[in-house]
Image (spheres, helix red, strand yellow):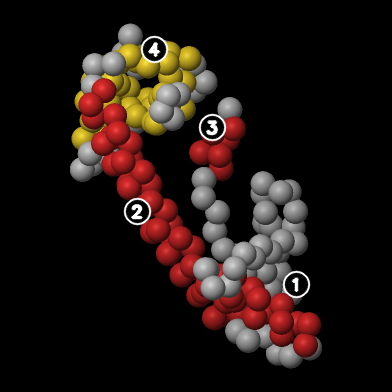
Amino acid sequence: MSLAVVKLLGSGEYAVELPGGTVDGHFGLAVKDYTHSTAPNRRFPDLATQRLIKAAIAGSPAPYTAEQLTDLARHCTLQEDNAAKVERQVRKSAAALLLAPRVGQRFDAIVTGASPKGTWVRILHPAVEGRVVRGDHGLDVGDAVRVDLVDTDVERGFIDFARV
């Protein structure tokens, strides 16, 4: 269930909250006033946050204009989305490589996505997701199902299952 909720929420994005303005806040935490910071040597958004906090504590002017912050937020969101796409592709290709010798084996799975575009399942051992290419009719998110691994494509990161 938690996997389905996370998928439905989608990815976050950086947003600038200006004095007197409105912002959605952090949906998952249900708070309006929110910032998050990790290690400024790892992520530029954290460095910008640290600079803003340092200026506020010192009573100094903000180190960025509102326009610069908006541009930075947009840029950082785009770059994180790009990095996530690469990471997702590497994980999918690694999973396809791991399962390639197991074509023809049967697995217990849970349906993690069902739409007109297709139906996806996650097998439990190893925890890997793939598409149901045969027998997906009537499956819905959360259903337990038995599937056969019918094909993998490492280069494209595809894992194909057929419902038993």
- Percent coordinates x, y for residue 49 in the rendering: 64, 73
Estimate the spatial distance between the alpha carbons at disc 3 and disc 2, rounded to whole Å: 22 Å
Which numbered marker is on residue 86? 2
In which image quadrant can residue 66 be found? bottom right
Estimate the spatial distance between the alpha carbons at disc 3 and disc 1, rounded to whole Å: 36 Å
Which of the two labelled residues, at mark 1 and mark 2, occupies the earlier sequence position? 1
Q: How many marks?
A: 4
Q: Amino acid at mark 2?
A: Val
Marks 3 and 1: which is nearer the front? 3
Which of the two labelled residues, at mark 3 and mark 1, occupies the earlier sequence position? 3
Which of the two labelled residues, at mark 2 and mark 4, occupies the earlier sequence position? 2
Residue at the spot of label 1: 20
Q: Amino acid at mark 3?
A: Ala
Residue at the spot of label 3: 4
Q: Quarter of the image containing the N terminus?
A: top right
Q: Amino acid at mark 1?
A: Gly
Which of the two labelled residues, at mark 3 and mark 4, occupies the earlier sequence position? 3
Regarding residue 84, the answer to whether it shows in the image is: yes
Estimate the spatial distance between the alpha carbons at disc 1 and disc 2, rounded to whole Å: 38 Å
Q: How busy is the neighbourhood of tag 3: few (under 14 within 10 Å), some, or many (20 plus)? A: few
Q: Secondary structure at mark 3?
A: helix
Residue at the spot of label 4: 146
Estimate the spatial distance between the alpha carbons at disc 4 and disc 1, rounded to whole Å: 55 Å
Q: Amino acid at mark 4?
A: Arg
147 vs 71, nearest the viewer:
147
Which of the two labelled residues, at mark 4 and mark 1, occupies the earlier sequence position? 1
Residue sitting at x 59%, y 68%: 39
Q: Secondary structure at mark 2?
A: helix
Residue sitting at x 75%, y 72%: 20
